[in-house]
Image (cartoon, rainbow, N blue to C red):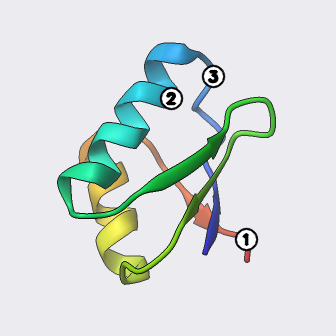
Amino acid sequence: MILSVPNMTCGHCKAAVEAAIVEVGGKADINLADREVEVNGLPEATVLAALKAAGYEAEVIE
């Protein structure tokens, strides 16, 4: 799935988003320029909840 994370604006944000996904057992491919994250193998609800807990709102775009 590909997520839009509009408030991911810097390297620190990128690291925080990646850490949140890794913490729930996933792997993130992050495109900071487009503010998108690709995550495979995790339920959508799990990823969205992990990002929300880290302070990042996300929306599934694919």
Q: Residue at x 54, y 16 (%)?
A: 11
Quadrant in which the C terminus appears: bottom right
Q: Is residue 16 left or right of residue 30?
A: left
Q: Residue at x 28, y 51 (%)?
A: 22
Label 2 neighbourhood size at 10 Å, few (<14), some (14-19), many (20+)? some
Label 1 neighbourhood size at 10 Å, few (<14), some (14-19), many (20+)? few
Q: Mark 2, mark 3: which one is toward the viewer?
A: 2
Q: CA distance from mark 2 to mark 1?
A: 18 Å
Q: Is residue 37 left or right of residue 32?
A: left
Q: Is residue 5 visible?
A: yes
Q: CA distance from mark 2 to mark 3?
A: 8 Å
Which residue does the numbered mark 3 point to in the structure image?
9
Q: Is residue 31 above or below residue 33?
A: below
Q: Nearer the viewer, residue 22 or 61?
A: 22
First of labels 2, 1 by sequence position = 2
Q: Residue at x 36, y 51 (%)?
A: 51
Q: Is residue 51 above or below residue 48?
A: above
Residue 18 placed where, x, y %?
40, 41
Instruction: Give the residue type that dot 3 points to.
Output: Thr
Q: Secondary structure at mark 2?
A: helix
Instruction: Give the residue type that dot 2 points to.
Output: Lys
Quarter where residue 15 is shown: top left
**Residue 61 bears which disc, if any?**
1
First of labels 2, 3 by sequence position = 3
First of labels 3, 1 by sequence position = 3
Which residue does the numbered mark 2 point to in the structure image?
14
Residue 6 placed where, x, y %?
66, 40
Q: Mark 2, mark 1: which one is toward the viewer?
A: 2
